[in-house]
């Protein structure tokens, strides 16, 4: 047996501790049940459930027509406000670029401008015979080939064969309207990915990808109702999936839509958040859950106009939530005396504009736009080949001379806001500016943040090994941290935040250990959604392009909460705790990567709490993000409407006299 003395045991413990740190092992702090990566999902879903319960109470109190009308107008105004300013109506410059005939219908290929030099490609399917006909707008779902997608063509042809004109158009990011093209002119990312790429810049500008899509739909209605062969008093709208989203938005906001049939979208937020989770950017309106705008409200805002929900039993848009929303809307329609004007068709199918839903939709349109209510069947018929449906010479609107992209329009908006920001910062007082930033980013005063509960998980077992603690800033949130202490009394304290997690630089000979050897206490912490509480990956491509936590970002967004604002409060709470345990002296703050913007906000809002700030590999500005929408990993730090008030360089000016060092800033180009 080999005997080891006390000195040898200590030496072996130190070596073991450094080996553990070197390997990055053994530095987890949080218990694994429940999984830490689900913390934010659970926390935000809980807040959403409470808000939706309040909404349900408010809806139950709508008992007379005047109260219902007031609710409808108020919610429509809120909806429009959250979309940001819609542009003025400009000439459509519409023209027919081709035409032809099919089995029982004819068609025209249309090109028009929803904004100057921003073209929309569309096909108008017309019944044979003389008009004027009822017109049905058909926004596409998320199909790469847009209006040429088979089931969407079949829906339009079936409408035309049954006496109703159908105008189907390509939304942005689909068909001939992709907004991101490779150098060879071919499409690059998919449609939902494009909508997300567009969405990050829109969020910063205080608008939404949905605003572009809604405006295109409204201008398509302008075109449809301008035609002499279309009766403007008999207008319908239907679409599936992303087209169901657009139909829901348009039918709620545009009074010209008499009859609507949104498909494979409407469910309820309570079921959506628990099941599939939030979807791409345009399907999330800032603060709508907090404001009480659930899926059923898209129907209720237009009551008592006829609305048919098209649903699928096996849809990822949960069928139980669809029935909940149907009953919710049905009750309100009944209070207005028109329960028969809202209905639901359920097909025992998966997600898609399947034949049972197409025939149900056409029957509904015939009932309310033609006054004929009888069974509709869909026989076999041929559809148009994709190449026959092109409206542009080279297959994409971006290849037209002088065409502007969504990125171009976002950059134009940012330039205008930059002028307004310059004026604001020139004339505004510092206290007023800080208050505007707080309100925009959702950051409370330090004095308003409750003292956190500190849970000791493990004491340092030997020299060189950290204490493990959990900071609980509020119920449901646990921030894991490692506390490293020097051998002699500390010279000061560092709060160390790394976008890849607290363990990233806690390696032997690494930055944290060098600070400890230099005599500093170091607290390495994970703010929410980082490190141990990083959300699990459910879409590898989007995890790389956007973030693993993109769905949690939108959970917060739907609640009107800023994810960055919550992280900033985490920084403030941790810094205050560290200062209080180190002689109440200001702490040094180091932030690397994704944690940079939160650290910058914390130092700008509460400069007295910090002795210095070091930012590494952080973005320079949000305007850079708008200019470079394909830059990876920018959604978690996007603040709705921030660029209406401030950009990150403005915060850097606010932190004076705190010393600031910026190292290796990210180049997004």
Image: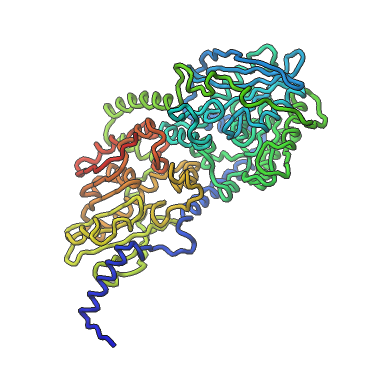
Q: Determine the residue positioned at 29% across, 56% down.
A: 505
The single residue placed furthest to the bottom in the displayed view is: 1
Q: Position of residue 393 (x, y in %)?
A: 54, 18
Q: Quadrant of the N terminus?
A: bottom left
Q: Nearer the viewer, residue 231 or 443?
A: 231
Q: What scheme was used to colour the molecule?
A: rainbow
Q: Determine the residue positioned at 37% across, 44% down.
A: 443
The picture quadrant where one finds residue 453 is: bottom left
Q: Position of residue 546 (x, y in %)?
A: 44, 42
User: How many dots with numbers?
Assistant: 0
Q: Position of residue 260 (x, y in %)?
A: 68, 30
Q: Position of residue 535 (x, y in %)?
A: 46, 52
In the depicted structure, whether residue 571 falls above or below residue 439: below
Is 563 on the left or on the right of 255, as rendered?
Answer: left
Q: Determine the residue positioned at 23% across, 51% down.
A: 588
Q: Is residue 443 visible?
A: yes
The picture quadrant where one finds residue 57 is: top right
């Amino acid at each position: 047996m080999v005997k080891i003395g006390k000195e040898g045991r200590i030496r072996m413990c130190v070596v073991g501790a450094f080996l553990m740190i070197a390997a990055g092992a053994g530095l987890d702090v949080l218990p694994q049940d429940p999984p830490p990566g689900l913390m934010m999902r659970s926390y935000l879903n809980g807040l959403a459930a409470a808000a939706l319960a309040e909404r349900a109470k408010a809806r139950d109190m709508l008992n007379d027509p005047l109260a219902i009308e007031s609710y409808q107008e108020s919610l429509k105004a809120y909806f429009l406000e959250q979309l940001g300013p819609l542009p003025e109506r400009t000439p459509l410059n519409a023209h027919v670029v081709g035409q032809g005939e099919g089995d029982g219908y004819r068609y025209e290929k249309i090109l028009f401008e929803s904004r100057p030099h921003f073209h929309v490609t569309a096909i108008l399917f017309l019944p044979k015979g003389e008009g004027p006909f009822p017109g049905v707008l058909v926004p596409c779902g998320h199909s790469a080939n847009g209006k040429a997608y088979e089931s969407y063509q079949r829906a339009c042809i079936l409408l035309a064969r049954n006496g109703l004109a159908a105008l189907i158009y390509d939304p942005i990011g689909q068909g001939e309207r992709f907004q991101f093209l490779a150098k060879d002119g071919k499409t690059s990312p998919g449609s939902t990915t494009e909508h997300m790429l567009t969405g990050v810049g829109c969020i910063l500008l205080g608008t939404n990808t949905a605003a572009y899509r809604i405006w295109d739909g409204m201008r398509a209605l302008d075109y449809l109702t301008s035609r002499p062969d279309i009766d403007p008093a008999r207008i319908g709208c239907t679409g599936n999936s992303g087209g169901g989203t657009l139909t829901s938005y348009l039918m709620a906001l545009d009074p010209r839509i008499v009859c609507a049939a949104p498909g494979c979208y409407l469910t309820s937020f309570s079921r959506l958040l628990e099941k599939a989770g939030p979807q791409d950017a345009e399907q999330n309106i800032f603060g709508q859950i907090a404001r009480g705008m659930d899926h059923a409200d898209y129907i209720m805002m237009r009551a008592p106009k006829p609305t048919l929900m098209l649903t699928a039993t096996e849809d990822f848009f949960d069928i139980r939530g669809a029935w909940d929303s149907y009953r919710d809307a049905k009750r309100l329609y009944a209070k207005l005396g028109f329960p028969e004007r809202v209905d639901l068709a359920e097909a025992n199918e998966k997600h898609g504009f399947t034949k049972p839903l197409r025939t149900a939709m056409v029957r509904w349109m015939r009932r309310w736009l033609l006054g004929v209510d009888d069974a509709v069947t869909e026989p076999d018929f041929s559809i148009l080949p994709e190449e026959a449906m092109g409206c542009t010479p080279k297959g994409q609107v971006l290849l037209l001379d002088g065409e502007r992209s969504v990125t171009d329009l976002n950059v134009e908006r940012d330039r205008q806001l930059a002028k307004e920001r310059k004026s604001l910062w020139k004339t505004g007082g510092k206290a007023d500016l800080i208050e505007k930033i707080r309100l925009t980013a959702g950051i409370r005063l330090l004095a308003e943040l409750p003292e956190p509960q500190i849970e000791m998980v493990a004491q340092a077992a030997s020299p060189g090994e950290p204490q493990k603690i959990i900071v609980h800033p509020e119920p449901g949130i646990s921030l894991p941290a490692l506390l490293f202490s020097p051998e002699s009394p500390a010279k000061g304290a560092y709060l160390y935040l790394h976008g890849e997690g607290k363990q990233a630089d806690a390696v032997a000979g690494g930055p944290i250990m060098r600070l400890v050897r230099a005599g500093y206490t170091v607290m390495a912490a994970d703010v929410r959604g980082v490190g141990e509480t990083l959300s699990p990956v459910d879409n590898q491509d989007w995890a790389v392009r956007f973030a693993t936590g993109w769905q949690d970002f939108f959970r917060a967004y739907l609640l009107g909460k800023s994810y960055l604002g919550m992280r900033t409060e985490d920084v403030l709470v941790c810094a205050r705790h560290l200062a209080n345990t180190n002689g109440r002296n200001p702490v040094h703050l180091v932030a690397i990567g994704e944690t940079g913007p939160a650290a910058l906000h914390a130092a700008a809002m509460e400069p007295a709490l910090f002795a210095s700030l070091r930012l590494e590999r952080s973005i320079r500005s949000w305007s850079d993000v708008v200019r470079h929408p394909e830059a990876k990993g920018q959604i978690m730090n996007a603040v709705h409407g921030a660029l209406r008030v401030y950009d990150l360089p403005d915060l850097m000016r606010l932190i004076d006299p705190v010393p600031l060092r910026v190292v290796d800033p990210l180049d997004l180009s």
